[in-house]
Amino acid sequence: MPVITTAGAGPVTPPPIEIPDVGYASITYIDPVGGRWPMTDLSADWYTLAEGVSGLGAAPYTLTSDPHPRGGARLRHVQPQPRTIVWPLLVKAVDHTGFVRNWRALARAFTRTLRDGPGLLEVARPDGSVRHIAVYYQEGWDGRGQTATGITWDSAVVTLWCEDPYWVDVIPQTIHRSYGVGEDFLEPYPSISSGQVLGATTLINPGDVDVWPQWRITGPASLITFTREDTGDSFTLNPSAVGHGDLLAGQQVTVSTDPPAVRYQDGANWVGSLDWPGAVLWSLPPGQTPVTFQLAGAEVGSAVDLTYYPRYETA
């Protein structure tokens, strides 16, 4: 069976099977160069052995506490820890040559994460929702070492290490706010503005944990401030602080909150345009968050686009 990759074809979703801590789901491993490896197609030459899978539930945490004078302790800090996923796999073929080809190809697909960056373990539900988690190969690509194995079939119990323990939605949440031209509602006939007016708004994070959004600002604008009203945290972008002057119509700047980065449309580093040291590149907690966008010098064409991917405790 040839190795399945994304070259020349769209994503292939394997049929769902029942996985511990997940239920019925279709699971695909995506290697660092985009090759897609179906993990739940029981008719294929490799597939997941559901018995023995672990690490797909809630993220692990370390709790830091202080002794309490009247007994017990008080929780001081909660720190999410890297996740470890145990992933048993069966590999087979109709003859030894095919088995060796499949075994080597899968070994490369997992171990190349140590050289080319993380792969993705992708979980698709029958309702169409899809979440993934970034994984690195840690250990386990060894055969059983028993009689009859290693000829036309063998199995491995792979351990995958996840620096971020949370599962991420593959579909981003996007919010668009643009400058609206005020019009008289009754003259000459009922009308509304062509865009949403920048200002106070409520953002909704449907995930289980904080997300760190990316902001794209489109000019014209001279001073841009984003405030999280429930905490008072804010940051202000001043294009003049990096010698550019006001953003003109159509010019764009992108602010990433994790890791912190500010890039002009040509890739120039604009991190100096933020109001350090007071700037707080705030996150969005689960649920509703009141925020305010303030764009000094805004005119028709001014806009703010917010993008983030919800994150979840479980697959």
Image (cartoon, helix red, strand yellow):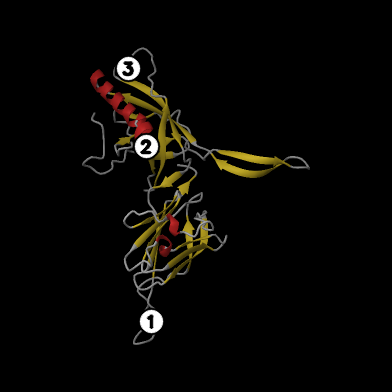
- Residue sticking out furthest to the front: 243
Question: In the image, what residue occupies the spot 46% across and 49% down?
Answer: 258
Q: How many numbered circles are shown?
A: 3
Question: In the image, what residue occupies the spot 55% across and 63% down?
Answer: 229
Residue assigned mark 3: 150
Q: Secondary structure at mark 2?
A: loop
Residue in front for this viewpoint, 276 or 95: 276
Residue 262 higher or lower than 152, as above or below: below
x, y (%) of residue 245? Answer: 38, 66
Which quarter of the figure has residue 231?
bottom right
User: Is residue 23 at least partly visible in the picture?
Assistant: yes
Specify the amino acid type for callout 3. Gly
Specify the amino acid type for callout 2. Gly
Specify the amino acid type for callout 1. Glu
Residue 209 higher or lower than 52, as above or below: below
Counting residues from the N terminus, which is met first, the one under dot 3 or under dot 2?
2
Residue assigned mark 1: 183
Counting residues from the N terminus, which is met first, the one under dot 1 or under dot 3?
3
Question: In the image, what residue occupies the spot 45% across and 39% down?
Answer: 22
x, y (%) of residue 299? Answer: 37, 73
Residue 176 higher or lower than 207, as above or below: below
- The mark closer to the camera, 1 or 3, is 1
In the figure, is residue 146 to the left or right of 9?
A: right
Residue in front for this viewpoint, 110 or 13: 110
* CA separation in Å, label 1 and label 3: 76 Å
Q: Which mark is residue 110?
A: none
